[in-house]
Amino acid sequence: MAKMMNPTKVVTGVCRFSYANLWEPKAMDENSKAKYSVSLIIPKSDTKTLDKIRAAIQAAYEEGRNKLSNGKSVPPLTALKTPLRDGDLERPDDEAYANSYFVNANSITAPGIVHIDRQQILEHSEVYSGIYGRASINFYAYNAKASKGIACGLQNVQKIRDGEPLGGHSRAEDDFDDDFNDFLD
């Protein structure tokens, strides 16, 4: 049976996960709803993923024209806030975002989390900011009191490989990888 194509859904190529809140939802402030979220850092060289994201943003804009309208007209896509952002411009002091674009994706529903072999990951320490993986994301139009634009929903993630942890937090396996046993003898 053929899969139905959803023009607003993208499965990314390999990207780096940052600000990974994939196990427990987190609220941005006391007035916000807690959400699962991740910042997907996509190398500028991954033109295939970036082209798919741009096409999905355009599709979400087309699907959401009524929602984006003020009753008289729809603002052009270029005038709206969109989720694809340039890491070199917006995070120039963070080397993890150098020569990359990024998309912040979130959901009130927990994402599915699997290994490269598509087996569910249950161990929380396996998924952290800094790993490399893929994500299934969905773009949609929104019109809130203060702003309107295109947002990115998080659906599922797939861990491809480990990476250097981001955010200054080290792994226990790395901290204790020394010759301590020499002191015990």
Image (cartoon, rainbow, N blue to C red):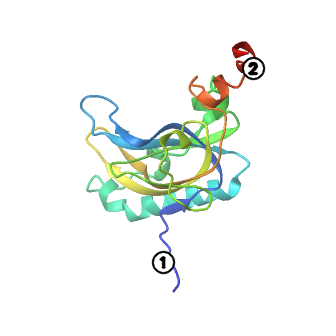
Identity of the residue drawn at 62% across and 57% down:
116
Q: Nearer the viewer, residue 34 or 123?
A: 123
Residue 88 shows in the view = no
Q: Is residue 101 visible?
A: yes
Q: Residue furthest top?
A: 183
Callout 1 amino acid: Met
Position of residue 175 relative to residue 1, above or below, is: above
Closer to viewer: mark 2 or mark 1: 2
Q: How far across and down, in percent of the image, does residue 48 sit?
A: 68, 59
Please name the residue shown 31% across and 39% down the image: 34
Residue receiving disc 1: 4
Q: Is residue 23 left or right of residue 52?
A: left
Q: Position of residue 133 (x, y in %)?
A: 61, 50
State the image quarter where residue 132 is shown: top right
Q: Is residue 17 left or right of residue 183?
A: left
Q: Earlier in the sequence, mark 2 or mark 1?
A: 1
Question: On the rendered image, what quadrant is the C terminus found in?
Answer: top right
**In the figure, is residue 2 to the left or right of 71?**
right
Toward which corner of the image does residue 21 lie, by quadrant? top left
Residue topped by disc 2: 179
- Label 1: state its secondary structure: loop
Mark 2 residue type:
Asp
Residue 67 place in picture, x, y as percent = 30, 57
| Gap in angstroms between the C-alphas marked 2 and 1 | 55 Å
User: What residue is drawn where x is 59% and y is 56%?
Assistant: 12
Badge 2 crowding class, 10 Å Cα cut-off, few under 14, some 14 to 19, many 20 or more, is few
Q: Where on the picture, by quarter, is residue 165?
A: top right
Residue 60: x, y in percent? 44, 60
Seen at 75% across and 17% down, the residue is 182
